Amino acid sequence: MKLYTVSEFAEKLGVSVTTLRTWDKEGKLVALRTPTNKRRYTEEMFYRALGIKGRQEPEKIILYARASSAGQKPDLENQLKYLKDFAAGKGLTVDEILTDVGSALNYKRKNFLKLCGLVTRGEVKTVIVAHKDRLVRFGFEFFEDLFAKFGCEILVVNKAEDMSPAQELTEDLISIVQHFAAKLYGQRTYRARKLTKTVREALSGAADGKTKEPAAEQKEMV
């Protein structure tokens, strides 16, 4: 099997050595490595690179907003106005606006999935969100890195770590507790329901500035 050096492969393909190094770094066309860490390319990689070379650069700019429930519709509208004003102030032309109503822990949101599909098809240049948790509650850095591999930047307008309303954070935490309680005790058992109720009451007390010591029965249960 013939192996091409970086300069040979760049000349064969009609691109610069810098372009090949960039493709390698971005994961678009990862070179083979010799024992001395030199890049090498194969004939099969040449035909794969022709497809990369012919692919159009991502162009779309998308606004994405999310609210956790229908009762937060005013918040969703405020997000959209905020994002539109930001884009206009930066001179950016918005191609599409996507919104969801649902928990940030739910990765099956209709338009979140649509957004991921557009990004992985190489159609999106920039996704603009108001806060990190409007996209996902956990794992933002994973999606940021994934989108970048397809030429897409996630632009977070407000980088504050936690901008969710207290009620939304509470419901997300309770969802996590319900999930693990079901794993531990079974979906419909008394212990699972009791654990969830205890956590809900504790969080409610914390939101009111009060704390409650769990009853002895609850301590034993957990």
Image (tube, grey):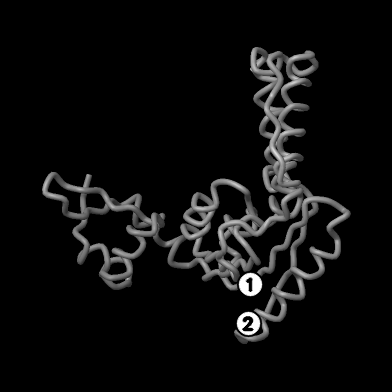
Task: Report the front residue among 97 and 219.
Answer: 219
Where residue 147 appears, x then y in whole percent?
53, 57
Above or below, comparing residue 150 to residue 88 in the picture = above
Q: Position of residue 32 (x, y in %)?
A: 25, 48
Q: Is residue 111 left or right of residue 92?
A: right
How dense is the environment of label 2, judged by Cα within 10 Å: few (below 14), some, or many (20 and up)?
few
Among the two numbered marks 1 and 2 on one chain, the one whose residue lies closer to the N terminus: 1
Q: Is residue 187 above or below residue 178?
A: above
- State the quadrant of the N terminus: top left
Residue at 61% from the left image edge and 56% from the top image edge: 162
Q: Amino acid at mark 1?
A: Ile
Please name whichever residue, 102 or 143, is drawn nearer the observer in this view of the structure. Answer: 102
Please tell me which residue lies in front, 10 or 151.
Answer: 151
Q: Nearer the viewer, residue 138 or 93?
A: 138
Would you say 180 lies left or right of 110 here?
left
Query: Which residue corresponds to mark 2?
Result: 92
Quarter-wise, where is residue 83 in the image? bottom right
| CB atoms of marks 1 and 2 within 8 Å | yes
x and y, in percent, of residue 183 in the image: 66, 19
In the displayed structure, 102 sits above or below 200; it is: below
Provide residue 212's location: percent of width, then percent of height. 71, 32
Neighbours of disc 1 within 10 Å: few (<14), some (14-19), many (20+): many
Q: Which residue is identified by label 1?
A: 61
- Seen at 63% across and 82% down, the residue is 92
The residue most toward the right is: 71
- Residue type (three-letter) at the residue carrying disc 2: Leu
SS of the residue under disc 2: loop
User: What quarter of the picture does the C terminus occupy?
Assistant: top right
